[in-house]
Image (cartoon, rainbow, N blue to C red):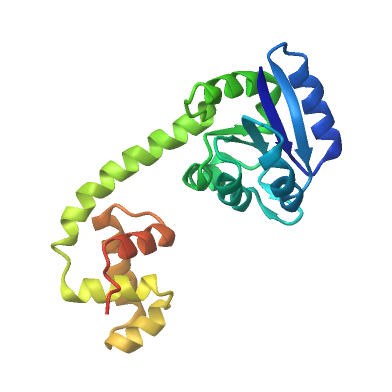
Amino acid sequence: MISIFILDDHRILRSALRVLLEQEANLTVVGEAGSIAEGLRALPDCGAQICLVDLTLPDGCGLDFVKKAKEQAEGVRFLALTMHEEEKYLLPFLEAGGMGYLNKAMADQELLRAISQVMDGQAYLGERGVQLMAKKWMGESDRSEASVKEQALSAREKEVICLVARGLTSAEIGKRLYLSPRTIDTYRNRLMKKLGLHTRAELVDYVIRHQLLEG
């Protein structure tokens, strides 16, 4: 028998999930809560093996709940059941200690499969999650090539990329380096292409990972 805890602030959804799950002979719901505080009080002693976690709760984010609950409820496996698209929360949830991620829109089709897979010790990402992870893996492969190119950055290029990462505008950077804003734009665009980056967030991540801001 697989014991399940439900953390979701919508009482009607919790009831619907309980009915869906307990139709299965090998599943039982041993507890539920509508907030992080309630969940942290109830989960450790209810005997749950799997905890279904919504990521938007009235007193915080489900990611924070997972980080805290892992310390208090050893052995529980966490499966996100949320309306949030995978792009925003999938990787942070896995990093927090979650083992699966499922969009609520697919719950009636995939939830039982996800529970079974997580209980077997395997991560469950769903089709969209697998696509996202594949995209990330390909991106990391591209970035590994870009890291080699970092060796060839000129001193001026490193100055520009660090100032961009710090959030300065082209005009502010140009004033510091005695260059025109248009020249700074040219530097930035050339650097993004050279390093295989597409957004400022990726640029900031690159600068931090390569410790270019030290000093």
Residue at the image position 20 percent from the left and 48 percent from the top: 145
Residue at the image position 66 percent from the left and 35 percent from the top: 52
Depicted 2 relative to depicted 125: above or below: above
Position of 53 compared to 124: left or right?
A: right
When asked about the image quadrant of residue 25, the answer is top right
The percent coordinates of residue 208 (x first, y second) are 33, 64
Q: Nearer the viewer, residue 26 or 161?
A: 26
Quarter of the image with the N terminus in it: top right
When asked about the image quadrant of residue 187, the answer is bottom left
Quarter of the image with the C terminus in it: bottom left
Depicted 212 relative to depicted 64: above or below: below
Residue at the image position 26 percent from the left and 76 percent from the top: 159
The percent coordinates of residue 210 (x first, y second) are 26, 62
Position of 9 compared to 50: left or right?
A: right
The percent coordinates of residue 35 (x first, y second) are 76, 49
View extreme (right): residue: 12
The percent coordinates of residue 90 (x first, y second) are 52, 42
Q: Nearer the viewer, residue 102 or 9?
A: 9
Residue at the image position 27 percent from the left and 49 percent from the top: 143
View extreme (top): residue: 25
Depicted 86 relative to depicted 105: above or below: below
Depicted 29 relative to depicted 83: above or below: above
Total of numbered circles in the picture?
0
View extreme (front): residue: 45
When asked about the image quadrant of residue 108, the answer is top right
